[in-house]
Amino acid sequence: MSKLSAGQIRNVAIIAHSGAGKTSLTEAILFNAGAIDRMGSVEAGNTTTDCEPEEISRKISVVSAVAYCDWKNTRINLIDTPGFINFIEDTRGSLRISDGAVVIVSAISGVKAETEKIWKYACEFEVPRVVFINKLDKEAANFQMALGDLEKSFEAEAVPLYIPIGEGEGFKGIVDLITMKAYVAENGKIEETDIPSSLQASANDYKKKLVEKVAESDDALLEKYLEGTELSNEEIMKGVREGSLTRRFIPVICGSATLGIGVSQILDAMLLCLPSPEDMSRISPVRGKNPKDGKEVERKPVETDPLTAYVFKTVADPFAGKMSVFRVYSGILRADSTVLNAQSGTKERIGQVFYLQGKKHVPTPAAGPGEIAAVVKLKDTNVGDTLCEEHHAILLERVKFAEPLISYAMASKNKGDEDKISIGLNRILEEDPTLRFSRDEESKEMILSGMGQVHLEVSLEKLKRKFGVEVVMKTPKIPYRETIRAFAKGQGRYKKQSGGRGQYGDCWIEMEPLSRGGGYQFVDRIVGGVIPQQYRPAVEKGIVEAMRDGVIAGYPMVDVKVTLYDGTYHSVDSSEMAFKIAGSMALKKVVQDAKAVLLEPIMQVEVTVPDDTLGAVIGDLNTRRGKIQGVEPQAGGNQKINALVPMAEMLTYANQLQSITSGRGLYSMEFSNYEEVPSHITQKIIAERQKMKEEQNQ
């Protein structure tokens, strides 16, 4: 195809819940448009866009993938997005650069929770949409159910442009309500024919509703319609486009991706109902900020405007280097050029530019306004960065991704691989903004955080495949603390004589609890030099070290006041080391009489759930020893629960909340305070720590 203007491009995200048929529809579109020679399948693991081994083995999309086709002198860039709940933040990033979206609704299951969430993302970016009701050839398929479900779930008026001929085993084709022609599958081909007589009345009713809805979108058409004059096909199509672009209603197409029925029609609908970059610049102009002065800058999708490109995806490859996938909003990004990364302020050398057809790279000398392309080996460029001209700098708004929901500790399968794990994970973090990797200073554990257990498992599979490092996931350690509840005092006396100079240190201390969060205080109340000044800091050092290692379960001690008030020394045998040991002995002895207890971290938790799951979620939080602080109504029929819950009860909460709410629930949490652990749980924790120590000493 020759060089295209921005008006001849469609950037379309294919969105829905996992299993609705996004990848199958993408494959059917590419095949139907002649972009690929043969049609693969998810079951066979040979589709164009599900090309990661983790996707093929699980038969779900885990990352968004870009492909393209040409249809009626228009370049259609398709983004096949994930629908599984753990990976839909990637879908959000893809919608940021899409001008339109095809929402797939299954004729079997209707609208699922993940699709509702993704729909909200599309609303966030004001992306016009069309709906494709898929799987009409499957048993229990129900077009009316799916239609009603999408209107109810999306709170939008759905306007069918096509209706099915039969359902399930009897599904044969579709009826075009604009041209009033039928398209029937026969001998592997789709043939145009007349509408079956049994469907004529139903088609007429649907056509009437379509025309009424179209007429409402334009005063001139409404006047013509009310006068009883029939609207022409061109007028209907114009009204459909207007209604779709302004999001007054949702055009609906139907069919079966695997049978190829409705695929040409969804391609036509992308051209008719979804905007080009040129259209979007009129609907919602591209604006950013000058990084130097913060002033707003506008860009138009023309080659004469300065270069503006947004990086929405990166792929880490240990051999080819990092690949950056971007959308050009204005100007031209040329091969063998130098651009500015407006985020980092660094210059990046552009080598070869190429289009993506799944994992296949198609070289191009340049990418112009509206195009999606990729480059490799950019050093300082990550997801959300803006590439531009040095003297016309602009920063486009970045996507704010959700914070991770679940964390696991990691241990290397092979000793000495810790550095490899760190290097490999940091590379994978570059392609996934929803992952976090850190080291716990207290437990010395490596912690990986993500959107769910499957998300973390897939990330570690990539780590093994790409960087040859294997790790084991385990529940991270809870940062418990120890403290005391009562006043106590006692002696620590260290005496050792083994010929020659001995060791002697003797101190008396008092311990008393401080208020929660009080930390640690040390008071020197020695009078008369019973312990010389030079040895007193050593006593405190021994006390601090003993507190750090804990006494009852090996966790750091907090919120205590220690007073050094008496002791004795030996002019020859006393030393700093002896008084340090004496201080440690004193603390361990006194703690036994001070009613030592274990403290656990309490999290401030916010959970947003649909009304119909409120009771079940509150009940579950109660079983987790949660204290409900209040419930606040939210927009869209949701409720926000505020609660205080022990951290130990929240480690696997993401999976449970997903199960209770069918993926519709969201939560966030942050540390609140420490509280005493119930005695029966304390005994269990102490027993587990003792067992762990014994195993380590074997």
Image: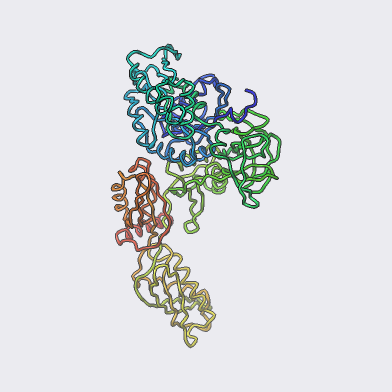
502 or 52: which is nearer to us? Answer: 52
Is residue 54 visible in the rendered image? The answer is no
Residue 622 in the image, given as x and y percentages of width and height? 30, 53
Q: Is residue 640 above or below residue 137?
A: below
Is residue 39 visible in the rendered image? The answer is yes
For the point 69% across and 34% down, the residue is 335
For the point 55% across and 45% down, the residue is 398
Residue 122 in the image, given as x and y percentages of width and height? 47, 38
For the point 38% across and 60% down, the residue is 600
Q: In this view, does 337 lie to the left or right of 467?
A: right
Q: In this view, does 666 lie above or below 646?
A: above
Can you tell which quarter of the image residue 648 is in?
Answer: bottom left
The type of colouring in the image is rainbow
Quadrant the N terminus occupies: top right
Residue 267 in the image, given as x and y percentages of width and height? 50, 24
689 or 106: which is nearer to us? Answer: 106
